[in-house]
Structure formats: structure tokens, C-alpha cells
């Protein structure tokens, strides 16, 4: 075996050994499943459910398509599944108890948000468990939305000043006109959009709220003493509002759904003994002329899905997400070439693209391995 082959095998061996994977004859023991197979569907659903439980801000996601699935043997038993899946943002906030599969997917004119995720799962005794995932979320651009809907609102930063005014006024109006005395405070800014095709622009905001220990009357005089109730006691809500700059409070529209105190249960992070809750509960609304403390991370347009890092399997993931730890490029590219299907594989070794190790600058020509035909990507569920 030449030097290039030795380097290739060692790279794969180290990566696989860390994850307990089985190698034979220097080539990973990899098999492919059709992306629409029952096994692939089950693994993908476990992956999406897990990602949603780890996602503490913004909206729930649902499966749109399975792009690829690889299965690797583990030692001493079980298998590792490596999935590439496309997700779509729904209209259900993460605090909404509605199951993600029953949530409406955000439409194209409303600026859909996609999540491209790579997920590593172990399967032991027929049970799937997610060990790592890495996601990249991206909304359609204003230009893409304009191609299908001229004049439709498009996303603007979550900390936009006029958007914040819309939240302040609409939440104040909600608290004043709520038939109940309880005061709700802003928990999170979830979405801000602007429609600028008319003479007077219109702003559309969506945000989560939480019940405090104050009544609306007490909040007027002692707002600094108002704090959110404990997660097990507080009702949470999700509000949508619209506003035009200069609108009087009477012209502000707001529509809120309030969820029961015992549902939903907030997500629990690994190694946590108490439910995790968003980090934005520390700022409060001070009526229609109040202030906000804006978290520094609110200068983007959507809440990213993030990642879960397990050193044993993360190196096998292939996402190029800017929201996650940098991928290990050599292992990603080598693995892709080794397990490539005949329909996409180069016709001869001389035509194979080079694999470049960014750390040492060495170009490696990956071997061409013929594998049975596989049916991927899978069906598209939405668009």
C-alpha cells in the first residue's frame, strides 16, 4: 500500500475507532438504505423530534426530505446511522404544546426558513438514540420572496427599533385589554417582518410571552418588581401583531394564544436537573412608552437550530453549518468519496476530485468503490 493509501486508511480508522465503528480491509463497512425506507423514516423522525426538544427559541421544525442515509456497524454491537435531512420551519413556537407534525409549515410568500441537518444516531436492540447533530438554518432572501410574491413582507433583524415599538405597544394593549388581571412580560422576540411596498410601511411581529407575579394594575406602579413565575406555574403565550409607525395604540392589532401552565414542559438540556428556559426573560415591557434591554444575539433574523456535539460521532457529520463547530474537512470528504454511489462516482481514478487536508496541504486521490444502487434523496413532503 502506498503512502497515500496508508494516510487514507489511518484517517478513517481513527475516526471510526472513536465512534466504535467496524472497518474491514481498510474500507468502512458501510451500507446504504433507500431514503424512503421504513428504517430511514423512523430514524429521521427520531432525529427531528430530538432536534426540536433541543431547540429553545423560535419555532418547531418538521421533516421535508431525507437527502442521504449511511449505516455503519459498531463494536461490539449495534449500528450508527448518519443522516442528512432537510427541515422546514413551522408556525408553532417551541412553547406551543401542539406536536410538530400537526403544525402548519410556513409558506413561501411568508419567507420560509430551511434547516439542513446532519445527524448521527445509534441503533441498539431496535431503538434509535441521537448522539450528535449539526444544523444550518437559512431563510429565503427578500429577492427570492419577491419572485413569487411582489410586495409581500420580508424578514428584518429581530432587534429592529420599529419592530420593538410594535411589540411594546401590542403587548401593552394586550395586558390592558385582557379580561384577566394577570400581567404578561416579553419572553422572546421570534420574528419581525416589514412590508415596504406602500407609502406607509407596515411591521409584523411575533413574540413569546410569560405570566408574571404582577397584576396589570400593580405593574403600572411597581413594574420593576414584576418577574416571571416559575416554569411549572407560569402560563406562556405566543402573540402576533402589526403596526405602522405613528399608529395610535387603538390602531395596533394583536392576537395571542395562551398555553396552560402545565403544558408545555420546557426542554431539559443534557445533565440538567431543572427544565431549561430561554435566556431572554430578564427584560420587561414598561407600558406603551417603556424600554427594553435587548440581548446581543438578537441582531439576526431567525433563531438557528444549533448543534449537539459528541466527539465520538460528530467527526462523521458533514454539515457546513456556520452555527456549529467547524467540520473536519478531510474526514468528511474522504468518507463521501468512499461511499459514493456508482451513478455519481468518477468513471476512473484519474478523474476523481482531490481531497485536500487544509492542515497539511496534501492532495489525496480517493479510491473509487463500487456500491449497489441506492434510492436517495427521498420524497419531498412540502416544497
Image (tube, grey):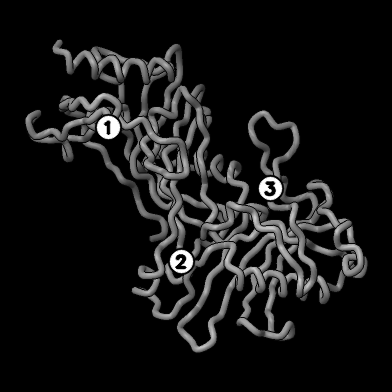
**Residue 253, above or below 30:** below
Q: Give how far across and how far down residue 270 sits, in percent.
A: 64, 31
Q: Give how far across and how far down residue 114 sits, in percent.
A: 44, 55
**Residue 173, above or below 108:** below
Q: Report helix, strand or loop for mark 1.
A: helix
Q: Which residue does the numbered mark 2 point to in the structure image?
A: 111
Quadrant location of the N terminus?
top left
Q: Are marks 2 and 3 in contact (CB under 8 Å)?
A: no
Which residue: 29% across, 43% down?
376
Q: Quadrant of residue 371?
A: top left
Instruction: Please report whichever mark, 2 or 3, sits nearer to the chain's N-terminal start.
Output: 2
Q: Report helix, strand or loop for mark 3.
A: loop
Closest to the observer: 172 or 241? Answer: 172
Instruction: Please report whichever mark, 3 or 1, sits nearer to the chain's N-terminal start.
Output: 3
Q: Nearer the viewer, mark 3 or mark 1?
A: 3
Q: Are marks 1 and 2 in contact (CB under 8 Å)?
A: no
Q: Give how far across and how far down residue 331 sits, in percent.
A: 31, 27
Closest to the observer: 292 or 247? Answer: 292
Q: Which mark is residue 333?
A: 1
Q: Which residue does the numbered mark 3 point to in the structure image?
A: 279
Which residue: 9% across, 28% down?
349
How far, Cα to Cα, is label 3 from label 1? 37 Å
Q: Is residue 232 left or right of residue 25?
A: right
Q: Are marks 3 and 1 in contact (CB under 8 Å)?
A: no
**Residue 291, above or below 120:** below
Q: Is residue 259 visible?
A: no
Amino acid at each position: 500500500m502506498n503512502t497515500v493509501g496508508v494516510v487514507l486508511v489511518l484517517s478513517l480508522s481513527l475516526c471510526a475507532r472513536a465512534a466504535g465503528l467496524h472497518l474491514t480491509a481498510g474500507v468502512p463497512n458501510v451500507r446504504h438504505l433507500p431514503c424512503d425506507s421504513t428504517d430511514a423514516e423512523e430514524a429521521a423522525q427520531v432525529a427531528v423530534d430530538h432536534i426540536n426538544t433541543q431547540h429553545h427559541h423560535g419555532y418547531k421544525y418538521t421533516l421535508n426530505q431525507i437527502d442521504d442515509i449511511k449505516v455503519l456497524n459498531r463494536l461490539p454491537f449495534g449500528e450508527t446511522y448518519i443522516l442528512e435531512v432537510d427541515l422546514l420551519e413551522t408556525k408553532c413556537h417551541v412553547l406551543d404544546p401542539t406536536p410538530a407534525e400537526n403544525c402548519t409549515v410556513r409558506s413561501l410568500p411568508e419567507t420560509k426558513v430551511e434547516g439542513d441537518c446532519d445527524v448521527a444516531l445509534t441503533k441498539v436492540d431496535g431503538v434509535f438514540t441521537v448522539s450528535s447533530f449539526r444544523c444550518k438554518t437559512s431563510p429565503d432572501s427578500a429577492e427570492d420572496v419577491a419572485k413569487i410574491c411582489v410586495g409581500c413582507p420580508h424578514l428584518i433583524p429581530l432587534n429592529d427599533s420599529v419592530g420593538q415599538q410594535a411589540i411594546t405597544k401590542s403587548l401593552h394593549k394586550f395586558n390592558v385589554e385582557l379580561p384577566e388581571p394577570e400581567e404578561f412580560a416579553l419572553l422572546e422576540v421570534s420574528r419581525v417582518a416589514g412590508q415596504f411596498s406602500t407609502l406607509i410601511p407596515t411591521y409584523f411581529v411575533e413574540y413569546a410571552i410569560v405570566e408574571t407575579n404582577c397584576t396589570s394594575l400593580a405593574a403600572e406602579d411597581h413594574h420593576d418588581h414584576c418577574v416571571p413565575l416559575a416554569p411549572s406555574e407560569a402560563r406562556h403565550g405566543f402573540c402576533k401583531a402589526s403596526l405602522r409607525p405613528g399608529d395610535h395604540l387603538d390602531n395596533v392589532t394583536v392576537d395571542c394564544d395562551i398555553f396552560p401552565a402545565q403544558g408545555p414542559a420546557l426542554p431539559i438540556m443534557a445533565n440538567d436537573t431543572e427544565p431549561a428556559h430561554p435566556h431572554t426573560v430578564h427584560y420587561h415591557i414598561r407600558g406603551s412608552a417603556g424600554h427594553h434591554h435587548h440581548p446581543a444575539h438578537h441582531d439576526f433574523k431567525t433563531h438557528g437550530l444549533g448543534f449537539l456535539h459528541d466527539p465520538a460521532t460528530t467527526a462523521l457529520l458533514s454539515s457546513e453549518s456556520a452555527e456549529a463547530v467547524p467540520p473536519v474537512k478531510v474526514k468528511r470528504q474522504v468518507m463521501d468519496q468512499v461511499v459514493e454511489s456508482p451513478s455519481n462516482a468518477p468513471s476512473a481514478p484519474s478523474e476523481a476530485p482531490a481531497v485536500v487536508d487544509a492542515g497539511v496541504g496534501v492532495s489525496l486521490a480517493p479510491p473509487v468503490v463500487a456500491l449497489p444502487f441506492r434510492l436517495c434523496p427521498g420524497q419531498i413532503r412540502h416544497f
